[in-house]
Amino acid sequence: MAVFEKVVHGNLKDVIQNTDMLLKEGKHKLDFRDEYSMTSQGMDVTVRIYQRYNVIPGNSTCITLLFQDNKDGDIKIAGLSAGDEYGIFGMDLGMGARTSQECEEKLESLGGAS
């Protein structure tokens, strides 16, 4: 399991769209599963869930991203990933913490502030 937080510049719709593309086309090719959006106290919040099952049964990864737009030009993103980091025979299949690390690196390419 891994957790990270990033701040990127832009508007919420574009940041979500770019993140979606990066995750679907990245090394792990995560599939979009579901989304929940709400507005509260002047900020927009969207939660998106991505998941991938591997060929080996029971080996999967899931990453949940929370996007927070305070209408100040910065989008805060919190990511939580969970999954099997080691598969059959102890081979590293790139799940869990590695998936989170790749996602965090891809978010940097969106023009991250921190």
Image: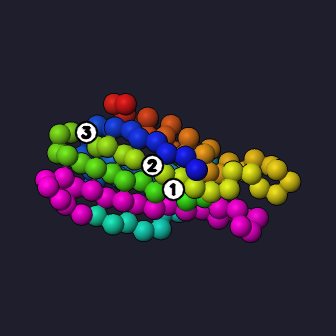
- Residue 61, x across and y down, in percent: 60, 58
Disc assigned to residue 79: 2
Q: CA distance from mark 3 to mark 1?
A: 21 Å
Q: Earlier in the sequence, mark 1 or mark 2?
A: 1
Residue 34: in magenta span: no
Given contact means CB atoms under 8 Å apart, are the residues at marks 1 and 2 in contact?
yes
Q: Nearer the viewer, residue 44 or 24?
A: 44
Q: Residue 108: name its quadrant.
A: top left
State whether residue 46 appears in this view: yes
Q: Secondary structure at mark 1?
A: strand
Disc assigned to residue 74: 3
- Residue 35, x across and y down, in percent: 37, 66
Q: Residue at x 32, y 43 (%)?
A: 76
Q: Secondary structure at mark 2?
A: strand
Disc assigned to residue 63: 1
Where 109 sits versus 71, above or below?
A: above
Question: Which residues are the magenta region?
Answer: 38-60
Q: Residues within 10 Å of mark 3 (few under 14, many from 20)?
A: some
Q: Residue at x 50, y 60 (%)?
A: 50
- Residue 12, x across and y down, in percent: 27, 50
Q: Secondary structure at mark 3?
A: strand
Q: Residues within 10 Å of mark 2 (few under 14, many from 20)?
A: many
Task: Name the kind of residue labelled 2 in the image.
Answer: Gly
- Residue 104, x across and y down, in percent: 49, 40
Is 17 on the left-hand or right-hand side of 81? left
Residue 41: in magenta span: yes
The C terminus sits in image quarter? top left
